[in-house]
Amino acid sequence: MADVQPLLTLRYDPSSVGSLEAVIAPPYDVIDDALRADLLAKSPFNVVEIDLPRPPADLDPYAHAGETFHSWRTQGILARESEPAFWALEQRYVAPDGSERTRRGFFARVRVEEYGRGRIRPHERTHPGPKEDRLRLTRATRANLSPIFSLFPDPSGDATGAIDAAAAGEPFTRASDHEGTSNILWRIAEPAAVTSLQAALSDAELLIADGHHRYETARVYAEEVGGEGEHRYVLMLLCALTDPGLMVFPTHRLLTGLKDDPARQSAIREAVRRDFEVTEVSREELEPSGEGKGVQLGYMDSFHRQPYLLTLKDQAIADAALEGMPEPYRRLDTAVLEAIILKGALGMSDDDISHLRGLGYSKSFDDAHDAVSSGRADAGFFMRATPVEHVREVAEAGESMPPKSTYFHPKIPTGLVFNVLE
């Protein structure tokens, strides 16, 4: 079972920074240069200054992050709580269909362990670059700045009930992020409430939804420091798998390096015609939405700009391409695309995919479509969202999905709470 403990929290002091909205930020891996500049324009104490450090060229970014973090603590910009607590988080947001949604969870520190049944499971493969970046940042700050987002089963509803009870009281603070999501925090420090949440998760297996790189970094750091202590735990936001506000978006695949390579263009066409039913569709139909129809992909290239819907002719094709893999994995759109097109037709290796050679990602349909239409990308595969239940089935089968198979929404802001590792 996972070891879930309250935090001896480090957090922004409102009397020093004013509005919490001015200092929080989305996770580092979704921030581009323009957004980073916008966030820092709100406050020089915005968390991106340490979570995504960009000092002048002659300074080491990680040393800068560590020094800035220490300085903020010394100045009282950041204050440490004197007693441990869980923190309930409610996020109110507008879904793509215009409906208002609410998702709840709670911040905790969770003991870092090897992946395994009954404890903590991943659901996606990771890239080496981000892990090295996050490890160097952790060494410099000796803290978890950005939380890992994990899911847990709650068949009895006990954990959900405990979170709802906390959220019935007066909030500790609230802040809206740059996308308009309202984030509301409640401090849970009463011994009975803490015990209630721990008991509700006493037999729970945690599934990492977002933050695999950060979790694997935490494992490396814990072993690097050695012994027992705060470094054996990592900051997480825990959410029930049954939470009605839990949403998963797709991440689209963009291909480059095809423009001057007719052989690879031909290889894609042959694989598509061989294994898929091909239907011309409109731009609006390019992002698949059908459920219960087997594997489906949207496709468009920059040469013809005609959108197509690709439907796998027979599940047996995926079974053969992914022989030896568990049944839930063989039904994954992203896994079938990787096996038949990326590795099969284009001959990409795991290393090519891991290091993004000829492959890119976009979380926005409009951005991905524009990338292909404008020629920034040579071709695009447009994905549908993977249901949460399918994510769980793949993890329970002991497999990790291809990178960027899911995009959980909304993101958990960085800067609401921090977890110190010393």
Image (cartoon, rainbow, N blue to C red):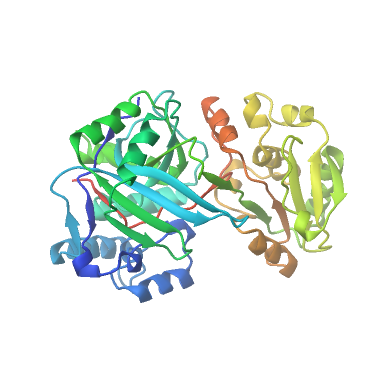
In the foreground, 72 or 227? 72
Picture coordinates of residue 110, whole percent (x, y): 31, 36
In the picture, measured across the screen, residue 337 lies left or right of residue 69, that is right
At 36% across and 40% down in the image, what residue appears?
164
**Can I make out residue 220 in this image?**
no
In the picture, measured across the screen, residue 137 lies left or right of residue 115, that is left
User: Which quadrant of the rendered structure holds the N terminus?
Assistant: top left
In the foreground, 148 or 218? 148
Image vertical order of residue 101 relative to residue 117, above or below: below
Picture coordinates of residue 155, whole percent (x, y): 45, 26
Image vertical order of residue 371 relative to residue 107, above or below: below
At 39% across and 43% down in the image, what residue appears?
105
Return the residue found at the far bottom.
Answer: 41
In the foreground, 258 or 77? 77
Quarter of the view holding residue 140: bottom left
Picture coordinates of residue 162, whole percent (x, y): 33, 35
Label tally: 0
At 74% across and 38% down in the image, what residue appears?
295
Picture coordinates of residue 91, whole percent (x, y): 43, 52
In the picture, measured across the screen, residue 66 lies left or right of residue 258, that is left
**Can I make out residue 123 in this image?**
yes
In the picture, measured across the screen, residue 8 lies left or right of residue 284, that is left
At 30% across and 33% down in the image, what residue appears?
197
Quarter of the view holding residue 133: bottom left
In the foreground, 19 or 391? 19
